[in-house]
Amino acid sequence: MTDSHPTTFDGVTPTPAWAFDQYQRLRDQLPATAANQSAPRWIASLEPLAGEFDAFVFDAFGVLNTGQAVIPGAAARLAALQALGKPVLVLSNAATASQQALTAKYRAMGFGLTEDRIISSRWLLEDALAREPRQGVWGVIAPAHSDSQSLGPLTQQPVRPGVSDQALDACDGFIFLSSEHWDEPLHAQLSNSLKRRRRPLEVANPDLVAPRGDCLTLEPGFFAHKLREETGITPRFFGKPYGPAFDAALERLAGIPARRILMVGDTLHTDILGARTKGMASLLVTGHGSLAGLDLETCIRTSGITPDFVTSSI
């Protein structure tokens, strides 16, 4: 399948430096946490930490895989931790695929994961919809292959290229699952509809960018913040770095103190920031994700978000 996530939008082509600057620009929209005054410990890999922590939570893109490609050694690292009896979770902002499809994807990549070991931002949204049913017609921004029926008893209007202004205006709210096929005309349509009548916007995936092969793609978080700035609507986010994602991970690991859980991620403003707000330890992976090629010491100092450990690959 050809990847159809946008790599440019309105003159913007995302780079690691651009993404970092954007996260900094949006800092007042992210969770607040006290700065860590200690310098991070730089390590060659995750291996020396296997005995220091009781459980491990992994981001997916930029840590385990980039797009459809598995990062070398990632599957073996998770398997080694599992062999030691260490609980392992994947906490991902992925929202296009259903839980069943996402689990099948990672098992096909060689990761020994079951559905209960994966927490996706899509699952977080589905759980919220089950607990708080939405009334009326909701526009769902997702490609046809995303199986949006797993969202539960929700009256849906697909929001894809070709949707009419009348169909958008009839929606009582919008759910942003995926940026696949999202483009300038469709964005302008939705923005104008929300200006005509303000309605809720719920966003499973808060990421601004995602690493896919040799490029960064623009993700729902980027477009949600543009809509916020254009319309004044405050989106409701479910994935990292926001509380629901990390609360769900801690609930799955009940009985293990947060300080004994290591969050492993590639982004300071999502993985590391979210972990710090919950008292979890953190390992920043720098070689494959949205910070690849940047001066990490400058990024840490500028953001004030300090991981406990840094490595280039797990």
Image (tube, rainbow, N blue to C red):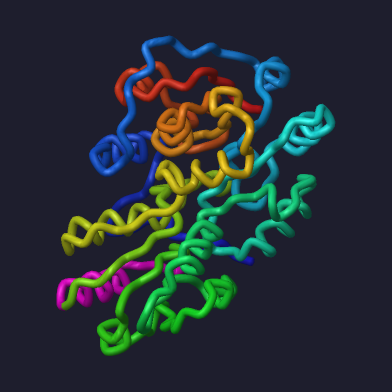
Task: Please state the horizontal and vertical placement of residue 261, each as a whole percent of the image.
Answer: 60, 28
Q: Residue at x 42, y 26 (%)?
A: 294
Q: Quadrant of the C terminus?
A: top right
Task: Please state the horizontal and vertical placement of residue 280, each as a whole percent of the image.
Answer: 51, 28
Q: Quadrant of the N terminus?
A: bottom right
Q: Is residue 218 above or below residue 187?
A: above
Residue 309 shows in this picture = yes
- Is residue 137 within the magenta segment? no
For the magenta stretch, what is the residue range? 181-196
Q: Residue at x 30, y 41 (%)?
A: 22
Horizontally, residue 298 falls left or right of residue 155, namely left
Q: Residue at x 56, y 77 (%)?
A: 149
Q: Is residue 113 above or below residue 303?
A: below
Question: In the picture, residue 175 is in which quadrant?
Answer: bottom left
- All told, the count of numbered labels is 0
Task: Please state the horizontal and vertical placement of residue 152, each as a whole percent of the image.
Answer: 54, 75
Q: Residue furthest front?
A: 255
The foreground one among 305 and 246 is 246
Horizontally, residue 187 falls left or right of residue 77, namely left
- Is residue 185 within the magenta segment? yes
Q: Main secondary structure of the magenta part?
A: helix
Task: Please state the horizontal and vertical placement of residue 287, each as a whole percent of the image.
Answer: 56, 29
Q: Residue at x 38, y 46 (%)?
A: 14
Residue 282 shows in this picture = no
